[in-house]
């Protein structure tokens, strides 16, 4: 998914510039960057977590991670591509934490989370809770497939953007996504 600008009118080039300045220690640039990318980050988190307060928590975690780990953005690709991964990982971490808390407080809750009822499972921005469960299962045995699959099928990033972000050849990205889809498909149909 590519954006020309966010709701505040900040272009990708301006965001990249703010990120570079923030990397060099400019606190004001960091504050401007976080304000500029917050709506985008929240939308990414909403795509994974259907409940607004959960998405807000994940967004806040993502922005804290951006502030703390801005130095790990390599600058090879767009900052927004790196931001996508940070936000997706924060949303998935929030989901895991919520699931673990639900299981700890009510062991019966795990069976509800294990197989979501399709009548009550929220479909937000093309994602479902059962997709998160499938990604959790795939990640245990095949972690290399999860990130490319989420970036392509949930967030609509181009193959080229994904390849540049994760630093592997385009053909490898396509193969990882294809194989990840084959692994996920039976889990999404309850054919385990």
Image (cartoon, grey):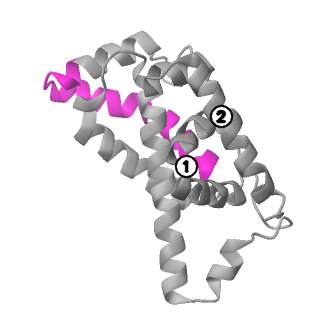
Q: Residue at x 43, y 32 (%)?
A: 83
**For residue 192, which quarter of the picture?**
bottom right
* Mark 1 neighbour class, 10 Å CA radius: few under 14, some 14 to 19, many 20 or more: some
Are the residues tagged 1 and 2 within 8 Å (C-beta)?
no
- The location of residue 30, given as percent across then percent down, is 25, 29
How far separated are the C-alphas under marks 1 and 2?
Answer: 12 Å
| Residue 156 visible in the displayed image | no
Q: Residue at x 54, y 82 (%)?
A: 103
Is residue 22 one of those drawn in magenta?
yes
- The numbered disc on residue 104 is none
Q: Which residues are magenta?
A: 21-49
User: What kind of secondary structure does the magenta stretch mostly adopt?
Assistant: helix
Q: Secondary structure at mark 1?
A: loop
Q: Which residue is mark 2?
A: 177
Q: Residue at x 66, y 42 (%)?
A: 180
Q: Residue at x 72, y 54 (%)?
A: 128
Q: Which residue is mark 1?
A: 142
Q: Earlier in the sequence, mark 1 or mark 2?
A: 1
Towards the viewer: 177 or 78? 177
- The location of residue 81, given as percent across then percent down, is 47, 26
Q: Is residue 51 above or below residue 44?
A: below
Question: How many numbered marks, from 0 up?
Answer: 2
């Amino acid at each position: 998914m590519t954006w020309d600008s966010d709701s505040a009118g900040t272009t990708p080039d301006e965001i990249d510039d703010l990120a570079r300045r923030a990397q060099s220690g400019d606190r004001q640039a960091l504050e401007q960057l976080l304000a500029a990318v917050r709506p985008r980050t929240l939308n990414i988190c909403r795509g994974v977590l259907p409940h607004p307060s959960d998405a807000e928590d994940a967004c806040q975690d993502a922005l804290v991670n951006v502030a703390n780990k801005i130095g790990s953005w390599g600058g090879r690709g767009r900052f927004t591509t790196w931001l996508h991964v940070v936000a997706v990982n924060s949303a998935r971490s929030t989901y895991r934490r919520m699931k673990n808390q639900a299981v700890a407080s009510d062991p019966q809750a795990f069976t509800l989370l294990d197989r979501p009822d399709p009548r009550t499972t929220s479909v937000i921005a093309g994602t479902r809770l059962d997709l998160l469960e499938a990604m959790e299962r795939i990640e245990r045995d095949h972690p290399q497939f999860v990130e490319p699959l989420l970036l392509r099928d949930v967030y609509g990033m181009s193959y080229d953007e994904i390849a540049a972000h994760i630093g592997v050849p385009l053909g490898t990205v396509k193969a990882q996504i294809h194989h990840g889809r084959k692994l996920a498909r039976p889990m999404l149909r309850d054919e385990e």
